[in-house]
């Protein structure tokens, strides 16, 4: 409503300014004929301007859709290469994994409203990782093996159009750097373990949010890919690709 009032005020201001300048022109030159010639000419050109703007917006929208299509391909490759395993492996070490699974356990009947509710939960997710049970050495080894792939994704200029996915890549890369910076991950001080737990939880928060967006995209556009996700996602009791 506030934006609408600002629009009305702005439109009224410019109309009043235009009328004022036309009035000044008439007072100086007393030539209404000249005023109406140019006024009619401007109005005659207005539909053409509107048409050009509409065509420009259509082309811009198509270009953006093509870019988003390519970006979703990149996001899909990320989850196939890294994200799906992180989602599945890490949730086993969350004390609130049952709550997370209850909110993110997608099924074939989910509507956009369901995805919206799950997305709100994931965006504010407070994952509670049991850092002492988690095998940090194994996680370090896994992420270090994906380092080149992550850096390649960060060099993709199309990612500038998707801030949230870029944040996910930065969070994953940062966790990799934190783990790599420690010669040994055994017998770490409690303060250091808590710091690593925060890094893991931050990455998982971004991971679940982007995963939901990507899965919703698959449900709307690629039902055969969505079918595989339904059978294999980690937020269910017994994920399996085998169709029973």
Image (cartoon, helix red, strand yellow):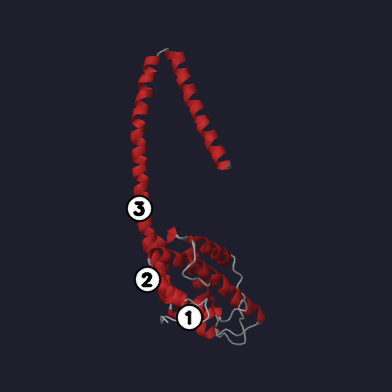
Q: Residue tagged by mark 2? A: 224
137 relative to 207, above or below: below
Please, is residue 62 above or below residue 110 in the view? above
Q: Using the image, tell me which numbered label, if any, was put on residue 62.
A: 3
Checking the image for residue 239, the label placed there is 1
Tag 3's secondary structure? Answer: helix
Task: Please tell me whether mark 2 or mark 3 is closer to you in this view.
Answer: 2
Closer to the camera, 167 or 120?
120
Mark 1 surroundings within 10 Å by alpha-carbon count, few (fewer than 14), some (14 through 19), many (20 or more): some
Report the disc number at residue 109: none
Instruction: Tell me: residue 229, above or below residue 38.
Output: below
Gap between marks 1 and 3, in whole Å?
A: 37 Å
Q: Dot 2 surroundings within 10 Å: few (below 14), some, or many (20 or more)?
A: few
Q: Quadrant of residue 188?
A: bottom right
The image position of residue 147, as x and y in percent, is: 44, 76
User: Relative to 151, is 5 on the left or the right?
Assistant: right
**Farthest top residue in view:** 30
Q: Quadrant of the C terminus?
A: bottom left
- Circle nearer the N terminus (2, 3): 3
In the rendered image, residue 206, in percent from the top left (x then y), is placed at: 53, 68
Q: Toward which corner of the image does residue 130 lie, by quadrant?
A: bottom right
Q: Nearer the viewer, residue 90 or 137?
A: 90
How many numbered markers are drawn? 3
**Residue shown at 47% from the left, 76% from the top:** 233
Q: Is residue 202 left or right of residue 81?
A: right
Q: Earlier in the sequence, mark 1 or mark 2?
A: 2
Q: Label 2, label 3: how many angstroms apart (C-alpha)?
A: 25 Å
Single out the residue that lies furthest toward the bottom.
186
Name the secondary structure under disc 2: helix
Q: Are marks 1 and 3 in contact (CB under 8 Å)?
A: no
Check disc 1 and report its element: helix, strand or loop: loop
């Amino acid at each position: 409503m506030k934006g609408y009032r600002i629009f009305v005020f702005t439109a009224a201001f410019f109309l009043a300014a235009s009328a004022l300048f036309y009035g000044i022109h008439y007072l100086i030159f007393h030539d209404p004929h000249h005023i109406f010639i140019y006024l009619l000419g401007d109005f005659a050109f207005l539909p053409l301007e509107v048409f050009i703007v509409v065509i420009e917006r259509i082309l811009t929208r198509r270009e953006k859709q093509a870019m988003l299509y390519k970006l979703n391909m990149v996001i899909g490759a990320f989850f196939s290469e890294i994200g799906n395993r992180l989602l599945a492996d890490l949730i086993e070490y969350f004390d609130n994994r049952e709550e997370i699974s209850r909110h993110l356990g997608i099924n074939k009947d989910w509507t956009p409203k369901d995805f919206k509710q799950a997305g709100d939960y994931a965006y504010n997710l407070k994952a509670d990782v049991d850092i002492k049970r988690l095998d940090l050495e194994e996680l370090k080894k896994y992420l270090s093996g994906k380092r080149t792939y992550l850096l390649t994704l960060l060099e993709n200029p199309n990612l500038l159009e998707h801030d949230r996915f870029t944040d996910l890549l930065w969070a994953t890369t940062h966790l990799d750097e934190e783990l790599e910076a420690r010669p040994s991950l055994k017998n770490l001080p409690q303060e250091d373990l808590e710091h690593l737990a925060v890094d893991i939880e931050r990455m998982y928060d971004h991971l679940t949010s982007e995963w939901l967006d990507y899965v919703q995209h698959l449900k709307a556009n690629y039902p055969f890919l969505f079918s595989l996700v339904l059978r294999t996602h980690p937020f269910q009791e017994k994920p399996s690709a085998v169709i029973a």
